[in-house]
Image: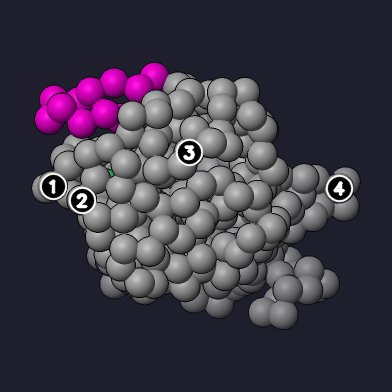
Amino acid sequence: MYKGQKSVRGGIEDFLCPFTDMYITQGSNGKLSHRGIMANDIRGKVSGVRYPYYAPCTSKCLKIYPESGQSMWQSTNKVRFANGRIDYATYMIAHDNDMTRYNYVGKTINQGDYLGSMGDKGNATGVHCHIQVSQSSDTSWYKNKYGNYTFNNEYDLDSCYFTDYTNIIKGNGGDFITTGDVPIITLPGGEAVDQILHVGSKVKFDGIFRVDIIKRGTNLFGNTNLTGVSFMTYYNEKAKPYHWIPLDDFKEVDKYGSEISQDDIVYGGQSYVINKNIYEVKEIDVPTNSAKLILNGREVWIFSTFLYEVG
Ligand SMILES: [Zn+2]
């Protein structure tokens, strides 16, 4: 981020990357001093230069540790993290040589305000900022089994920061995103929702779906797009129970989505259906990008791509 940058959408601040240039010299679980913790050491463009960094969100200083140029901050409200979570941010920064000159317990700074400068105060190897972020209001700060201090609920930086206007020089393999990757949709009622599904999200089916196959003697159908299961797997009765979808809440349409002149008798391989109901996400599976919904009392797993969040 740059000095003074703000990002507020739907009344919630996006948690921004405090650094204008980011060169990670030691990542999370690093062997040097980060074993078992989600901490990162960041330097700027030129090694040894004490670059400034800025408040990722409007924050209050909770603690200072002058001997290591270290301070603990917490967001004054819930913020939006890069992984879609909306919660308080509690974060620790360290090694700022002059920190005690301008930071003190109880100080509140706005998003984009000067937060500190990289430094080498305390047990630091070279000028950098050590940063650790917890997606929680829990301020517990304790040593783990390797002797490194940690928060509960720490996440790596790519799950925390939106890197709008951060020049990532060395991202250490992180999958960094910007706010543009997480569109916020404002609903007619004025409520703003992102499109990152989580447990408890309210979702609708997005699209017109072909009934690829009907399970014999049931009202369950298979759809290769929604579940990723191949037609032959369905055909050979090898699909898992949660890949069969009950037809009850679906309405027959033509392939353009029109309900006109459809008889509601659905044929495998011919008919198209839509679903206008709202469901709650019960579980998320990140590796397969799927969400578990309950349709007519039956658990089904659906690719998130075909769902959109409405609350
Ligand atoms: Zn460190």
- Quadrant placement of the C terminus: top right
Q: Does residue 124 lie above or below 61 as drawn? A: below
Quadrant housing residue 94: top left
In-image side of 308 versus 188 (left or right): left
Q: Amino acid at mark 4?
A: Gly
Q: Does residue 168 lie above or below 293 as drawn? A: below
Residue 18 image offset from top left, x and y in percent: 52, 54
- The CA span between labels 4 and 3 is 41 Å
> Secondary structure of the magenta portion, mostly?
loop
In-image side of 5 versus 84 (left or right): right
Foreground mark, 3 or 1, reads: 3
The answer to whether the residue bearing label 1 lies less than 8 angstroms from the nearest atom of ligand 1 is yes
Image mark for residue 190: 4
- The CA span between labels 3 and 2 is 18 Å
Q: Residue furthest right?
A: 189
Element assignment for label 4: loop
Mark 1 near mark 2, Cβ–Cβ under 8 Å? yes
The segment highlighted magenta reads: 140-150
Residue located beneath label 2 in the image: 125
